[in-house]
Image (tube, grey):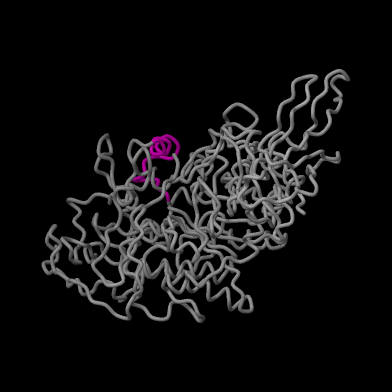
Amino acid sequence: MNRREFAYLLGALASTPAAFSFPVGNETGNKADPAGDSPSAAGFNKYTEDWAQFCAAPENERVFYALVDGRIVSERLDNENWQPTDWGHYAPSHWYHESTHPPELPVPGGSHYGVPMISPIPNLAGQGPYRPTWESLLEYDCPEWYRDAKFGIWNHWSPQCVPEDGDVYAHNMYVQGSGQNKFHLAHYGHPSVVGYKDVSAQWTLLNWDPSELMDLYVRAGARIYLALANHHDNFDTWNSKYQPWNAMNVGPHRDVIGTWAAEARKRNLRFGVTTHSAINWWGCQVSHGADATGPLAGIPYDGRLTLADDRNEWWHGLDPQRLYIPKHPENALPDISYVKNYYDRTCDLIDQHNPDLVYFDETLLPLGWGGMNIGAYYYNRSLAVNGGKIEAVINVKNVPSNLAKAVVYDIERGGTSGIQTYPFQTETCIGDWHYLRSLYEWPGEYGQYLPPRAIIHWMVDVVSKNGTFILNVPGKPDGTIDSKERRILEEIGEWFKINGEAIYETRPWTVFGEGPHMLQLGSYLSNPVAEFDASDIRYTCNKAGTVVYAIVLGWPQSQRGERESGLLLKSFGASAAKPVKVANVELLGCQQRMQFNQTSEGLHIEWPSFAFTERSPRDTVVIAPSDIAVAFRLSLV
């Protein structure tokens, strides 16, 4: 099952005053406070206890806040009528239900993800010029290194790869009747007994050779390496100071992020981290449910466990509530301690590992003031550690055009219909985001993985429009990748050996391309380049603007004994918006001299002469540098 974006709410992003007030109330409109006295909602967004204290508090003593009839009111958990929130609802077509999202709060300055934009805690942005407002973040300029890199490799490696049953396992294993729930019952047992905490302990990485893998990624052409820091399972893969459920304490007992960072930097790769945990306030609630039918109906899943249930268990000293998130009313807004913990965890990740890129799997910077302060802190820190030069990149999703300059906006599994003013990023997966064994077991040299042709065509289209392309290669629980994944990476690397100069350190040309097949703006597309062929051309150019690369997405198949009429690039004709004169044409990876002629119709390039093959001296075919895509270097006058 494919992951889907959580929300499309952009929120009110106006400039924020120094202080604010909001409507308050003392009743939820739901069930009366079981303690008999409903606490005042004036406590909303006031930091009085940290996340560990909130998680350790008895269930009946926790106070939550919700928006009811236009007012922020306090409430307590009503177990009799509880259900997981629709804001973390599983549906067959997508995980996070796009028609439901946290409401806009009646507070000056607006809110985002149910959290005010104004921080109640001062001085979270760090020292420097950037403040936690979009107006301030718009002073950002994307660093040159990112615009030059163009291609990166990403690994989704977390305890969710243990079952080898695909993405979002930590959520779906608790959804009765889902495929992953059935898998869990068959292989591990009932989630009231064996839950995700127990799966996480089986993530061993016993055969992990990060050095060998990083060499492979370099051979595949990567200039950026991205590592998964946490996911929708709420498990941190580094030695996290603010989440005890982490890879040092549970599972591999290694700082996975730190190890990846060191290996990437040994090879002069830029290093990025990805975080996906902001929405876990909602998404983890299913762990508190129970089967609705069957022999174990009504028996709570292991999300019910607390430190009080620790009777020398293997997880001794670890509070399960820190992993599963405390059970809360369906409409509860994120607690301030949760937001602060999210801020602390992410800043700790930044401080420990100094990433060049931080990817947020959410719409804009998530959780109101929490995400905004992380963004400002990261930019300010980048200035401090790089001698006053900004080297940081932030990826977020669903960015409106007026905010595009403040970040590098991300389009998951998609692309754009034209050249973008500001750099953007697209990422896709070779298969599912977390390892899915059935894709490997499918017959054929690539199984059901995305083949090298589609990956390269997609990447070329993205780069031609001012984008960077990231490819996720999911790993197995023992720390290895399978043979078909390796084959795909090696073939991509062979293409880059010949054609890399048409990709790396390039910029968009006057037009991005021509041909009958065009990728349209959108996200979550399985293979939007499936129809691309040799009739499609994409353009890039060098920084000086003196060389244009015409990348043909295929190689025309010649009939025996026939000569192709050649290639016509209409973008170089008299009707071009900005006519240019071509002085020389070369085919990357080919020593033969190219014959060409520029007319008002366009640039005519003759294909290279036919060459004899070893199969038969009578059968002549064009020997192409690649049958996936070839690049012509066009030197301009």
Q: Residue at x 49, y 57 (%)?
A: 230
Residue 187 colored magenta?
Answer: yes
Residue lying furthest right in this view? 617
Residue 620 located left or right of residue 502:
right
Residue 483 located left or right of residue 525:
right
Residue 171 colored magenta?
Answer: no
Q: Residue at x 44, y 59 (%)?
A: 401
Residue 328 x %, y %: 26, 58
Answer above or below: position of 41 versus 555.
below
Answer above or below: position of 575 versus 58.
above
Answer above or below: position of 439 versus 434.
above
Residue 25 x %, y %: 15, 69
Q: Quadrant of the N terminus?
A: top left
Residue nearest the observer in this picture, 7 or 474 = 7
Highlighted magenta segment, given as a residue range: 179-196
Residue nearest the observer in this picture, 477 or 551 = 551
Residue 38 located left or right of residue 90:
left
Looking at the rendered structure, the number of numbered marks drawn on it comes to: 0
Residue 606 located left or right of residue 379:
right
Q: Residue at x 29, y 67 (%)?
A: 57
